[in-house]
Structures are given as structure tokens and as C-alpha cells.
Amino acid sequence: MTIIETYLANAAAQRAAAEKTTLPNRREMHERSAVTWETMARAAADTQGLAAVNLAAKTGAGA
């Protein structure tokens, strides 16, 4: 499981927890946590993409 998959799984778990609770404050807490995990997953994916671009630029510049 990649770090991105782990983050998305954590977000899904938080959303599931939000659906199960009857307390509004707790539901909001879980929703905020899910958004945070999804943001972290997007950031990790962006970083991965930038790393690939940088690597391609380095190998292309050396050729």
C-alpha cells in the first residue's frame, strides 16, 4: 500500500466514523480529519509527479 493509498484509506475511515456518530461536533471533527487526509494525499501525489518531472529533466539534461 502506497502512502497515498494509506492517506485515502484514513480519509475513508474518518468519513465512515462521521456517518456513525450522532454527535454533531464529533461528526464535524471526523469530516475535518477526512479533508486533511485527502489534502495530504493530493500533496503526496503532486510531490510524486514533481519528482518524476525533475528526474526526467535531470536525465534529459545529461544526455
Image (spheres, rainbow, N blue to C red):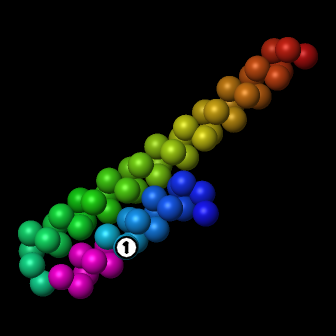
Horizontal and vertical percent for residue 16? 32, 78
Relative to 19, 25 lies left or right: left
Provide the residue designation for mark 1.
13
| Residue 23 in which image quadrant | bottom left
Q: Quadrant of residue 30?
A: bottom left
- Residue at 16 percent across and 66 percent down: it is 28
Mark 1 Cα shell of 10 Å, populated few (<14), some (14-19), many (≥20): some
- Residue at 76% from the left image edge and 28% from the top image edge: 56
Viewer-closest of 61 and 21: 21
Quadrant of the frame with the C terminus: top right
Q: Is residue 13 left or right of residue 27?
A: right
Magenta stretch bounds: 15-21
Q: Look at 76% across and 20% down and name the residue there.
A: 58
Is 16 included in the stretch rendered in magenta?
Answer: yes
Identified by mark 1, the residue type is Ala
Counting from the top left corner in percent of width and height, residue 46 is at 54, 41
